[in-house]
Amino acid sequence: MLPPIDPSAWTIDHAGHLLSRAGFGGPPEQIEAFHKLGLHGAVEALFVGGGAQTPPPAWTHDASSPRTEFNMTMKGAMNDDQKREAFRQARQVERQRLLELRSWWLGRMREGRQPLLEKMTLFWHGHFATSFTKVNVAYFMWQQNETLRAYALGSFHEMLRAMTRDPAMIRWLDLGKSKAGEPNENFAREVMELFTLGEGHYTEDDIKEGARAFTGHRIDPTTMEFVFQRRVHDYGDKKFMGRTGNFNADDIVEIILAQNQCARFIAQRVWEYLAYEDPEPAVLDTIAATFRDSKYETKPLLRSIFLSQAFYSPRAMRTQIKGPVDWLVNACIALNTSLPAQPALDAILSRLGQLPFEPPNVRGWEGGKSWISSSTLVLRYNLAGYLTGSREPEARVVNQRLRGPVDISRVVPDSLRSNPDALADALVFRFFGTPKFPKMQQRARDVIAQTPQPIDDLEAAAICQKLMSTPDFQLT
C-alpha cells in the first residue's frame, strides 16, 4: 500500500505544497483556508468547481474558419496572387485567434477557480502533445483543449478514445491520410510509445497492424468535426498484441488498456508531474494498481497521490523546478495582479521555453532541469523585476510595456513596513507558500535590513524582486 499521511500531521506547510502542486499556488489567505479544511477536506475541495469561468473567445462558437473558407474559395476563380493573399490573410487571422486562445486558457489558470482541473489539463496537453505550428487551425486547438479538460479528472479510457477522433491530433500525426492498403504508421506508433505503453512494450508488427485499424479517420471540412470514412477503412483481420480480429480503433484502445504496462506508464507520468521523478517501486506498484482497479479513472489516482506520505516527504517538497507557465501564473498570484497582456504574454513564455498550444515536438516539453539555463534564469530574474514594478524590462525581453506595475501596497502593506520581522514573515508566506521557512525568512530579513528606511513603494517592489530572484522561488 501507499501509506497515507496521518490527518493529525497535516500542517499549513502541507497545505501550501498541495496548492502549489495541484494548482499554481495560492495567496496566504487561501493556503490558510485550505489548512483549516483538514487533509481530506482540502483534497476533496480540489475536485469541486469554483464558480463561473471566463467564456472562451467568441469565434469558438462558430465552426467556420478562415482556413476552411480559404480552401473553399480556392475552388473558385482565383489567380495565383489572389490565392497567396487569401492564404496570408487566413494565416494571420488564425494566428490572432491562437493568441486569444492562449490568453483565455492562461487566464483560467490565473483565476484559480478550478486549479487542479487546469493543472491536469496542462499535463494532458503535454502528454498528448499537439502543436498549432502544424495544425494551423485555432478552432481545432480549442476543441482539443476542451476535450482534455472534459476528461482531465475523469476517464483516461474515454480520453484516449477521444484522441483517436480528435481533429487536431488527426492533422498533427497525419492520420487523415491513412487508408486501406496505405496505412500511416505514425499515429499507431505514438499511441503506444508516447500515450499509453512507453518504448519496449510493443513490436513493429503491432505498429503495422494497429495502423490498419486506424484507417478511415478523417475531418469533415465543413463541420470541422471527426468523420469516419468507411470506404477507406481496412476491414481485414489484424494480429495485434497476441490477438486476432477485424479490429477498429476502439478495439485497439481496449487491447492496449488491458495491458498492465499501460496503467503503470500513465501512473508514473502523473506521479512525476505532481510529486517527483523516479518513484520508488512500491509507490509505483500501488498507484498503478489503483489506476488499473478503478478502470482508468483519474480521480482515485489523484486522491491516492495527494493523501500519501510520499507526496509530502522531503523528496517531494520544494524540489520541483517550476515550468514557465507555473512560474508566471504563480508569480502573478503571489503579486495579486493580472497576467501580462498579449503580445507580451507570448514574448515572455516563448523566451522562457513553454508556449501552450505549441509544444516543441510529439514528446511535449521535457520539463525538469531543462526549464533552467543561464539565460532563462537571468530572464526570470529580469521579469520578476518588471512584474513587481521595480524596473523596466530590457528591450530584448519585449518591445512594449508589458503591463502596469502591481499595486505594491497590497503585497507589502504600509502597516508592516516598519516591522522588519513581521514583514519578512509575511513576504515569505506570500512568495514561498509557507509561514515557516527559516532560510528564506533570514534572507528576507537581510534584504529588508539593507533597504533604505522608511520603505517606499519602489523599495518595497525591489524587496519582492529580490525574493523572486532566489533559487528557492524557482522551485515548488
Image (cartoon, rainbow, N blue to C red):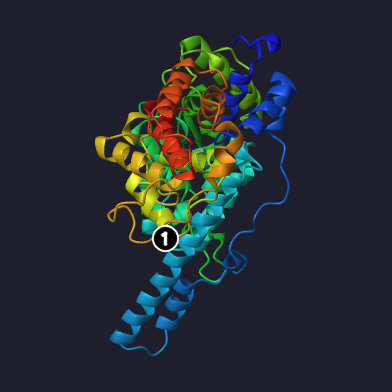
Q: Residues within 10 Å of mark 1 (few under 14, many from 20)?
A: some
Determine the secondary structure under disc 1: loop
Residue displayed at 30% across by 52% down = 394
Residue 345: x and y, percent? Answer: 43, 54
Viewed as shown, does residue 301 lie left or right of 248? Answer: right
In the foreground, 407 or 237:
407
Q: Is residue 126 above or below residue 183?
A: above
Q: Is residue 231 visible?
A: no
Residue displayed at 45% across by 25% down = 444
Viewed as shown, does residue 155 lie left or right of 91? Answer: right
The residue furthest front is 454
Residue 149: x and y, percent? Answer: 60, 45
Q: Is residue 462 visible?
A: yes
Q: Quarter-wise, where is residue 14 in the image?
A: top right
Can you say which quadrant of the picture contains the N terminus? top right
Viewed as shown, does residue 26 lie left or right of 130? Answer: right
Total labels: the figure holds: 1
Q: Is residue 131 above or below residue 445?
A: below
Residue with the mark numbered 1: 343
Viewed as shown, does residue 367 lie left or right of 404? Answer: left
Q: Quarter-wise, where is residue 343 in the image?
A: bottom left
Residue 39: x and y, percent? Answer: 69, 19
Q: Is residue 364 above or below residue 82?
A: above
Residue displayed at 39% across by 90% down = 77
Residue displayed at 57% across by 43% down = 409
In the foreground, 67 or 342:
342
What amino acid type should be assigned to the residue bearing mark 1?
Pro
Residue 187: x and y, percent? Answer: 41, 46
